[in-house]
Image: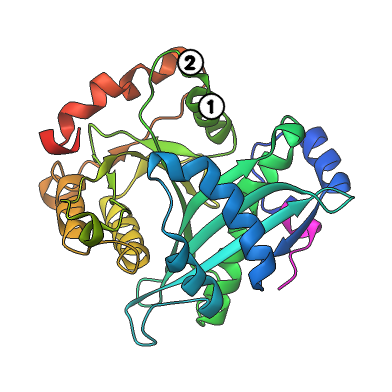
Amino acid sequence: MTILMSELGEAMHGENREKVASAMRRFTVEEVTGPEAFDAGYRLLDAQFGPVNEIERREVLERWQARGSLSAEDAPVRAHYHMLLFREPDGRVAAVRDAFSAVDRESRRVVVLLSHSLVMPEARRTGVAALLRAAPVILARRDAAAAGIAGAKTLLVAEMDPVVPGQSATVVRLLSYAQAGFRVVPPSSAPYAQPDFRDLEALGAEAVPIPMMLVVRQVGAEARAELDWPDLEAILDGLAAIHLHSVQRAQLPEIRRNALRYRPAGDEPPIALLQPRREEDLAPLHRGVVLPHYPPAWR
């Protein structure tokens, strides 16, 4: 399925328009549909995320890519997988984005997990990262329309590590996403964890979920500084529909329970979101501040 650069431009929020325009002239984008392109994208992602156990096993994503969805046809929340390659004029891969959409027809919500993004060193600071952030909006709209719920509420979600002072990559990423309309769900309100993607049966090991922060863009309502608890619940349901095909399922209820541990009676007040503008704003997200909200075994 073709994604037009004009569509990406319409899906932007808060990005540097000059850099975006330059990137749109320089790069092309393709949605992966065959094994050769998938191999190119997965190898790059695995080299980056595999060593820190933050990517699904290859055979799992190959099944997603080949079938589009591993969800049952009648599942209440149906998940779909997408991988995008952004290429230089000479055909070299400049950036990779993969993402899942979880479509809930009954609640008319689409939760999009921005699973992995990678920009090659020679393509950094070109504006292509803005295209990676915008593309999932287009994917969500198409999946919602295919499910008969065009105009569904769309929530883009990224999982990010807590901040470690001195590690600039996480700081730069958080500030860039904040500029693009994303806000952080503070773990002091909703301590989410990413599932353990390892082959635990083969290893003979217990699952150890990884403490993460949810970073959310409420598409069309980016100025809203709060997230309703039912929307957080929808995010957790969407992520569970995605992850249940990739991980030992017993860990998913524990992750959900911990993320909702501070939910108030009556769902009031809603979750106050953080939108960091400077590195000093990240203090509530430092690893030492965040980890006490998780079980000791997960820290």
Residue matched to label 1: 175
The residue that appears at 18% across and 38% down in the rendered structure is 298
Q: With 229 as the anchor, is 181 left or right in this view?
A: right
Point out residue 2 in the picture as x, y percentages from the top left corner: 75, 69
Residue range of the region highlighted in magenta in the rendering? 1-8
Q: Quadrant of the C terminus?
A: top left
The answer to which quarter of the image holds residue 3 is bottom right
The residue that appears at 38% across and 78% down in the rendered structure is 71
Point out residue 126 in the picture as x, y percentages from the top left corner: 77, 34
Residue matched to label 2: 279
The residue that appears at 35% across and 87% down in the rendered structure is 74
Q: Earlier in the sequence, mark 1 or mark 2?
A: 1
How many neighbours does mark 1 have within 10 angstroms: few (below 14), some (14-19), or many (20 or more)?
some
**Element type where label 2 sits in the image:** helix
* Badge 1 vs badge 2, beta-carbon distance below 8 Å: yes
The answer to which quarter of the image holds residue 289 is top left
